[in-house]
Image: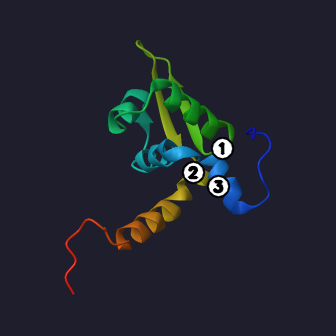
Protein backbone atom coordinates (compact mmCIF):
# COMPACT_ATOMS: atom_id res chain seq x y z
CA UNK A 1 0.00 0.00 0.00
CA UNK A 2 1.44 3.39 -0.92
CA UNK A 3 1.42 6.51 1.22
CA UNK A 4 -0.99 8.21 -1.17
CA UNK A 5 -3.61 5.50 -0.71
CA UNK A 6 -4.55 5.52 2.95
CA UNK A 7 -7.33 3.23 4.16
CA UNK A 8 -10.61 4.74 5.30
CA UNK A 9 -10.69 2.71 8.53
CA UNK A 10 -9.05 4.76 11.29
CA UNK A 11 -7.24 1.81 12.88
CA UNK A 12 -5.92 0.59 9.52
CA UNK A 13 -4.85 4.16 8.64
CA UNK A 14 -3.00 4.44 11.97
CA UNK A 15 -1.20 1.16 11.30
CA UNK A 16 -0.15 2.29 7.81
CA UNK A 17 1.14 5.65 9.08
CA UNK A 18 2.95 4.19 12.09
CA UNK A 19 4.03 0.92 10.52
CA UNK A 20 6.70 -1.09 12.27
CA UNK A 21 8.17 -0.59 15.71
CA UNK A 22 10.56 2.18 14.69
CA UNK A 23 7.82 4.60 13.68
CA UNK A 24 6.24 4.62 17.13
CA UNK A 25 9.63 4.88 18.84
CA UNK A 26 10.62 7.84 16.65
CA UNK A 27 7.42 9.62 17.68
CA UNK A 28 8.17 8.77 21.31
CA UNK A 29 11.55 10.48 21.03
CA UNK A 30 10.11 13.53 19.28
CA UNK A 31 7.55 13.96 22.07
CA UNK A 32 10.50 15.33 24.11
CA UNK A 33 10.94 18.20 21.64
CA UNK A 34 12.91 18.92 18.47
CA UNK A 35 15.70 16.46 17.71
CA UNK A 36 18.52 16.27 15.22
CA UNK A 37 18.99 13.17 13.08
CA UNK A 38 22.03 12.07 15.08
CA UNK A 39 20.14 12.54 18.37
CA UNK A 40 17.34 10.32 17.10
CA UNK A 41 19.81 7.66 15.94
CA UNK A 42 21.53 7.74 19.33
CA UNK A 43 18.23 7.35 21.15
CA UNK A 44 17.20 4.41 18.96
CA UNK A 45 20.04 1.85 19.00
CA UNK A 46 19.76 -0.55 16.08
CA UNK A 47 17.86 1.71 13.69
CA UNK A 48 19.54 2.09 10.32
CA UNK A 49 20.04 5.54 8.80
CA UNK A 50 17.92 4.42 5.84
CA UNK A 51 14.98 3.40 8.04
CA UNK A 52 15.14 6.59 10.10
CA UNK A 53 15.29 8.76 6.98
CA UNK A 54 12.43 6.84 5.37
CA UNK A 55 10.17 7.16 8.43
CA UNK A 56 10.95 10.86 8.91
CA UNK A 57 10.17 11.57 5.24
CA UNK A 58 6.89 9.65 5.49
CA UNK A 59 5.95 11.60 8.64
CA UNK A 60 6.82 14.86 6.90
CA UNK A 61 4.66 13.99 3.86
CA UNK A 62 1.68 13.30 6.14
CA UNK A 63 2.12 16.41 8.26
CA UNK A 64 3.19 14.57 11.41
CA UNK A 65 6.71 16.03 11.51
CA UNK A 66 8.34 19.24 10.31
CA UNK A 67 11.92 19.37 9.09
CA UNK A 68 13.75 22.64 9.68
CA UNK A 69 17.12 23.26 8.06
CA UNK A 70 19.33 25.97 9.54
CA UNK A 71 21.84 27.76 7.30
CA UNK A 72 24.86 27.08 9.48
CA UNK A 73 28.24 25.53 8.91
CA UNK A 74 27.89 22.61 9.21
CA UNK A 75 24.20 22.61 8.28
CA UNK A 76 21.83 21.74 11.11
CA UNK A 77 18.52 19.98 10.55
CA UNK A 78 15.92 19.45 13.27
CA UNK A 79 12.78 17.35 13.28
CA UNK A 80 9.78 18.29 15.37
CA UNK A 81 6.25 17.01 15.78
CA UNK A 82 3.48 19.14 14.33
CA UNK A 83 0.20 19.65 16.20
CA UNK A 84 -1.05 16.54 14.40
CA UNK A 85 2.00 14.61 15.57
CA UNK A 86 1.60 15.93 19.13
CA UNK A 87 -1.86 14.35 19.05
CA UNK A 88 -0.08 11.00 19.27
CA UNK A 89 1.02 11.78 22.85
CA UNK A 90 -2.25 10.49 24.34
CA UNK A 91 -2.12 7.42 22.09
CA UNK A 92 1.41 6.50 23.16
CA UNK A 93 0.64 7.16 26.82
CA UNK A 94 -2.42 4.89 26.56
CA UNK A 95 -0.31 2.21 24.86
CA UNK A 96 2.31 2.43 27.61
CA UNK A 97 -0.31 2.23 30.37
CA UNK A 98 -1.97 -0.76 28.75
CA UNK A 99 1.36 -2.55 28.20
CA UNK A 100 2.48 -2.13 31.82
CA UNK A 101 -0.81 -3.71 32.95
CA UNK A 102 -0.05 -6.91 31.01
CA UNK A 103 1.48 -9.47 33.39
CA UNK A 104 5.00 -10.64 32.60
CA UNK A 105 4.80 -14.45 32.20
CA UNK A 106 8.45 -14.69 33.26
CA UNK A 107 7.92 -12.80 36.50
CA UNK A 108 7.50 -14.58 39.81
CA UNK A 109 3.75 -14.48 40.46
CA UNK A 110 2.58 -15.33 43.95
CA UNK A 111 -1.08 -15.56 44.84
State which mark lies toward you, 2 or 3.
3
Q: Residues within 10 Å of mark 3 (few under 14, many from 20)?
A: few
> Residue at the location (41% across, 36% down)?
35
Query: Alpha carbon of mark 2 to alpha carbon of mark 3: how far?
Result: 12 Å
Q: Secondary structure at mark 1?
A: loop
Give how far across and how far down residue 50 sits, in percent.
51, 25
Camera-nearest residue between 106 and 37: 106
Q: Secondary structure at mark 3?
A: helix
User: Marks 1 and 2: in contact by CB < 8 Å?
Assistant: yes
Instruction: Tell me if 99 is positioned left or right of 21 in this view.
Output: left
Mark 2 and mark 1: Cα distance apart in space: 8 Å
Q: Which residue is mark 2?
A: 85
Kindly identify which residue carries mark 1.
63
Q: Position of residue 82 (x, y in %)?
A: 58, 47
Residue 66 position (above or below residue 72): below
Q: Nearer the viewer, mark 1 or mark 3?
A: 3
| Quadrant, the C terminus | bottom left
Disc 1, disc 3: CB below 8 Å?
Answer: no
Question: Could you tell me which quadrant the N terminus lies in?
Answer: top right
Amino acid sequence: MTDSCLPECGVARFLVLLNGPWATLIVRELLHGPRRFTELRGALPGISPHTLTSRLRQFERHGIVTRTMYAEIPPRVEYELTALGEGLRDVLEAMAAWATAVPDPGADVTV
